[in-house]
């Protein structure tokens, strides 16, 4: 995995932390308080400590161990900061992060003002046996997955690779060649959707290489019961824009590689 992006991002986040008191306005009466320090939840690492943990990693398994030491809110803050940096500040400069990712940086460093009113809490109703909440799913998905139609590799910085290969038969019903697709791009989550944005796609159709147009794929996150089981432990990504007319071609039933 390497240390570079996480080390650079940790330093630039630290450079963006406000040093003075920050005003916070809620309701009709303004209140002033010193900017809070990055907090460590009762269940584990703070957002900044999570990035420090990432710096020691060389593979996805290590990243998963780091994520396991942080609560879901901290995981979400780290994921949002990395995605913003990857999409808007590819050079990782602190000035860019401060301008383009100020909300994400504030959430990760603990410099964002905290509301004093009671905001309504929405709790996801998880299905029996569901291994993770649908909300904030991307950090949990870091690593390689095999779907029924595609193979995926999710990275902690918001990158994703999607690949597929289909063996093709000629008129003699013998498989002589294959059609291969490799898409590399970014992924982010909006509600129960994973939205993948790919640049030009590289295809190899029976040894004829070409580059297709950029595309956006929207997958709806769902949890189903594996055949013969009673719990909803199986993750499925449903391509909601699929035109092939059948779940067999439009849905990817997922398992970790």
Image: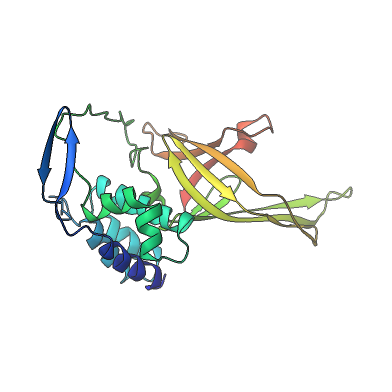
Q: Is residue 83 above or below residue 135?
A: below
Decide if residue 244 is on the left or right side of residue 105: right
Name the image quarter holding residue 190: top left
Which one is in front, 38 or 62? 38
> Residue 72: x, y in percent?
27, 46
* Residue toward you, 68 or 9: 9
Q: Residue 93 sits in which quadrant? A: bottom left
Residue 154 visible in this rendered orientation of the protein: no
Horizontal placement of 192 versus 44: left or right?
Answer: right
Q: How is the image coloured?
A: rainbow
Q: Position of residue 145 (x, y in %)?
A: 49, 53
Q: Nearer the viewer, residue 180 or 56?
A: 56
- In screen coordinates, is 31 left or right of 207? left
Q: How many marks?
A: 0
- The residue sitting at 55% across, 38% down in the picture is 218
> In the picture, which quadrant includes the N terminus?
bottom left
Picture residue at 18% right of the left edge, 55% below the top: 38
Q: Position of residue 120 (x, y in %)?
A: 22, 26
User: Residue drawn 58% across and 45% down?
Assistant: 148
């Amino acid at each position: 995995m390497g240390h570079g992006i996480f080390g650079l991002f940790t330093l630039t986040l630290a450079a963006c932390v406000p040093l003075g008191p920050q005003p916070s306005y809620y309701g009709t009466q303004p209140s002033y308080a010193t900017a809070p320090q990055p907090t460590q939840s009762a269940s584990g690492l703070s957002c900044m400590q999570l990035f420090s943990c990432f710096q020691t990693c060389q593979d996805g398994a290590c990243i998963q161990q780091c994520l396991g030491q942080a609560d879901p809110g901290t995981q979400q803050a780290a994921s949002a900061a990395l995605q913003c940096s990857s999409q808007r500040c590819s050079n990782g400069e602190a000035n860019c992060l401060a301008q383009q990712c100020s909300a994400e940086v504030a959430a990760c460093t603990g410099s964002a003002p905290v509301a004093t009113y009671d905001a309504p809490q929405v709790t996801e109703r998880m299905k029996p046996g569901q291994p993770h909440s649908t909300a904030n799913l991307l950090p949990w998905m870091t690593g390689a997955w095999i779907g029924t139609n595609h193979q995926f590799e999710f990275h902690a910085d918001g990158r994703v690779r999607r690949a597929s290969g289909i063996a093709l038969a000629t008129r003699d019903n013998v498989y002589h060649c294959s059609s291969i697709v490799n898409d590399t791009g970014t992924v982010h989550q909006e509600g129960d959707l994973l939205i993948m944005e790919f640049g030009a796609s590289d295809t190899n159709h029976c040894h004829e290489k070409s580059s297709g147009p950029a595309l956006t794929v929207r997958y709806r996150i769902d949890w189903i019961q594996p055949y013969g089981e009673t719990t909803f432990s199986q993750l499925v990504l449903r391509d909601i824009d699929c035109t092939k007319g059948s779940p067999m071609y439009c849905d990817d039933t997922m398992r970790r590689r």
